[in-house]
Amino acid sequence: MSYRMGSGPGGAAAGRGSTPIRLRTLPNGMRLVSEQLAGVRSCAIGVWVDMGSRWEQPDEAGLSHFIEHMLFKGTARLDTHGIADAINELGGNVNAFTSQEQLCLHARTIDVKGPAALDLLAQLLLDSTFPVAEVRRERGVILEECKMYEDNPEELTLDVFMRNLWPEHPLGRPVIGRRGTIRSFDRERLVEFWRRELRPERIVVVISGAFDAGAMARVIRRRFMPLTARGRGSRPRQKRPVGAISRQSCLRRTIEQSHFCLGTAAPMRRSPERFGFGLMNLILGGGVSSRLFQEIREKRGLAYSIGSFTQYFNDAGSFAVSGGTSPTLLSEVLRITVDEIERICEEDVSERELELARSQVIDSLLLGMENTETRMMRMADAVLTHGRVLGTEEIIKRVNEVDAAAVRASARKYLRSGPLALSCVGPSRPSLPAGLRAWP
């Protein structure tokens, strides 16, 4: 069974009067993506920078994330209180995040406030002053954030898993950095790194929703077009992450459950194999009808939380099964997990499982098209990854082309070929199933 896109807001335009997606490159190399949608009053704006923790040297770990915090701590025109007031005037929906490969400032507001929101994001990105007193204060905030993550067993398990998967690569480090490096950062270090990374060809501005195109264009001309590379130096050259051997780590914490993360490498973001692999992930552990959820939670009652997930990067990917259970049950949960991974590598999935997985992907895509912020995020990811926006019909076509043979092929290629990584956090070291005990 193939799922098709119907008429309405799931299409390239959200209704009569909507404009197609426009992608253009400014003379300085910065890219602008926009789509005007009819029938909405919201405007979602994202200013994306192609940078992140993967471009940091070991002694720079956490600089990108630190800079994200500092972008809200003062500009040439606004202090922290002024920035807070400006955010509240826009409705309070302004935020930022840093990942391994992206830094993003984003806002969602009503149509008439779109130009003001874009102007504020431009100020934060281009005119931040990194006050010395604020650097000292924010260092303490980020160190507290580190403690918060370390107190969260799910977050800690994921961090240790990534370190085990790619121990010699920046993708294996937490985006937030390490306490030692965070304590070492001063204003000079932050500004030097920011000048290295902030180049117009790495910036993508994405706008989706209802907005005055002329007013937005004036902000772009005034704020972004004068931008040039601000500093010298280039990024360090970096190899594709490769796991050498299988690794496992078990950390003891005084908590009630044992949490685990078991996985391996996956296709990269640009790989056409990600469609088959993504459906395989959904069938194995991507929802309440998945094999792991049904077998471990519904049939046996061994866990409340169990599932699988993928992460895609420019030149690599990761796949993992994660969950939490009683320490005495962890070995059994791991054994079933390994059995289910082996089964999806050996046997074709059923047509019914494929139908449900396709439906999850396509319905989620179509529902997301009704939200301006989701549309903005999807366009940004597509442009940063592919240099263009993939049409909804194109994505649906690729999903529908995946058959049972492709699912099994992707499972065999990735779940069997590379080294496994395992992380556990709990009150005691687990007794591992026989197949996992042989790891060094």
Image: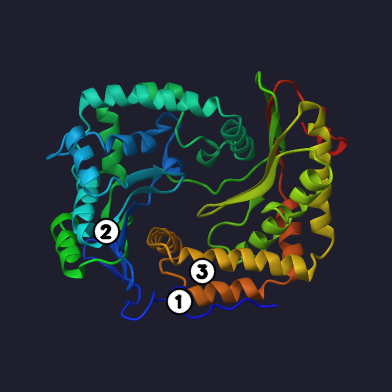
Residue type pointed to by label 1 = Gly
Residue 246 drawn at (x, y percent)? 72, 38
User: Which numbered circle lies on residue 366?
Assistant: 3
Residue 4 drawn at (x, y percent)? 58, 78
Q: Earlier in the sequence, mark 2 or mark 3?
A: 2
The Cα–Cα distance between marks 2 and 3, rounded to whole angstroms, is: 22 Å
Question: At numbered mark 3, what does the secondary structure look like: helix, strand or loop?
Answer: helix
Label 2 or label 3, whichever lies nearer to me, is: 2
Query: What residue do we see at 52% from left, 47% from top?
Result: 239
Camera sees residue 415: yes
Q: Residues within 10 Å of mark 1 (few under 14, many from 20)?
A: some
Residue 136 drawn at (x, y percent)? 28, 22
Query: What residue do we see at 19% from left, 33% from top?
Result: 81
Q: Which residue is mark 1?
A: 11
Is the residue 81 above or below the residue 140 in the image?
below
Q: Which residue is mark 2?
A: 110
Camera sees residue 264: no
Residue type pointed to by label 2 = Ile
Q: Residues within 10 Å of mark 3 (few under 14, many from 20)?
A: some
Camera-side residue of 136 and 302:
302
Question: At numbered mark 2, what does the secondary structure look like: helix, strand or loop?
Answer: strand
Dot 2 and dot 3 residues touching (CB under 8 Å): no
Q: Quadrant of the C terminus?
A: top right
**Residue 353 sits in which quadrant?**
bottom right
Position of 215 compared to 189: left or right? left
